[in-house]
Image (spheres, rainbow, N blue to C red):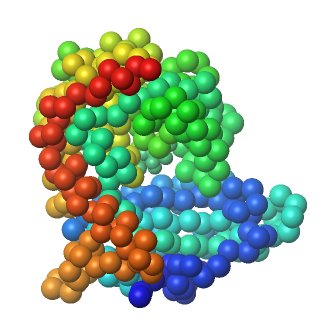
Amino acid sequence: MSENLIYFNGKFVPENEPVISVFDHGFLYGDGVFEGIRAYNGRVFKLKEHVDRLFDSAKAIDLDVGMTKEAMTEAILETIRINNLTDAYIRPIVSRGNGDLGLDPRKCEKPNVIIVAKFWGSMYGDLYSVGLKGVTVGVRRNAPDMLSPNIKSLNYLNNILAKIEANAKGADEAIFLDSNGYVAEGSGDNIFVIKNGEVYTPPTINNLKGITRATAIDLLREEKIPVHVENISLFDVYTADEIFVTGTAAEAAPVVWVDGRFIGTGKPGPITLKMVKKFEKVTGTTGTPIYAAGKAPAKSAAKPAASTAKAAATKTAAKPAAKTAASKPAAKTAARKPAAKK
Ligand code: PLP
């Protein structure tokens, strides 16, 4: 049975082979940066934007990636090709590299560069059609003068603490406030609220400069739907007609319930559904081609490349569910149950 291959410092190695030293400062301290990228239908969506953001994150923590953007771009494409994928989630990681047990980054001579590419269906499965439950969490989003939320760093503990809280409260996603009490973002996605046909999203000082967020703004403006980038409060969230979140992993997902209140009708609303449809179209038809014309393999989903029966079962199970959820917002009529209120 074949195993996926990962890129590690210029070589490809089986994904289960240990490559990272316990002295790697990404492992020891979260000292490093990463990206999450998706490929659809043989094209990598917004590849340049993701590579640019990876390098910006690295610059912000004074980390020399040790390769050019062009070389990184090619390494990402090659990692997808070597695994014969057409639809994939791609995770480039650049850590400070191997040092000693002290945290001084000067002890790390060169970064470790890893790229993982695997099939990963829709993150929220069937919830795209009924909408997510969101909760505000007590933990505040990192302030920009602490660990800037603009840096996509290997230290995601702030986000993980929010997720733990959301899990404990029985919600699908956390909604972070910043230290001033303004709405910041989700644990892994940006947030949009809709009121009276106009869309509002917070400025990116208190959240990640989301590439899906930028795409959503473009798509909404193409439809002549006004989009305002301004501070929003919990009042705006609770009284919204519609809410959705965006992210590479999460894609575009409606939120229909927050902190015990149904949002609008409690079902995904018309602007959200229009946006989701346009998002599916743009991801399915644009992006950097992975393969030369006529060289693309059969669709990723058709090829169970997993090394164990359990993993293979997960893979084959994930795909149809993902497709149904993503391509059929028609199931939108189902509202979330009030039981969510517990
Ligand atoms: N906010 C956070 C904290 C994230 O981790 C992500 C995902 O990477 C996003 C927002 C959405 O960003 P993007 O759309 O670029 O994936």
164 vs 102, left or right, is left
Residue 54 relative to residue 333: left or right:
right
Residue 62 horizontal/vertical position (percent): 68, 57
Identify which residue, 220 or 117, lies in the foreground.
Answer: 117
* Quarter of the picture holding the N terminus: bottom left
Q: Position of residue 303 (x, y in %)?
A: 28, 79
Residue visible at 42% across and 66% down?
90
**Image quadrant containing the C terminus:** top left
In the rendered image of this protein, does residue 205 appear above or below residue 111? above
Image x and y of residue 289, in percent: 25, 73
Q: Total marks drawn?
A: 0
**Left or right, 241 with reference to 80:** left
Q: Is residue 204 visible?
A: no
| In the depicted structure, whether residue 314 falls above or below residue 147 | below
The answer to whether any part of residue 3 appears in the image is: yes
Residue 298, placed above or below residue 220: below
Displayed quadrant of residue 270: top left
Q: Give me the residue at 42% from left, 37% from top.
A: 172
Q: Residue at x 32, y 82 (%)?
A: 84
Q: In front here: 18 or 145?
A: 18
**Which x, y percent locates residue 139?**
62, 29
Residue in view at x 23 percent, y 83 percent: 297
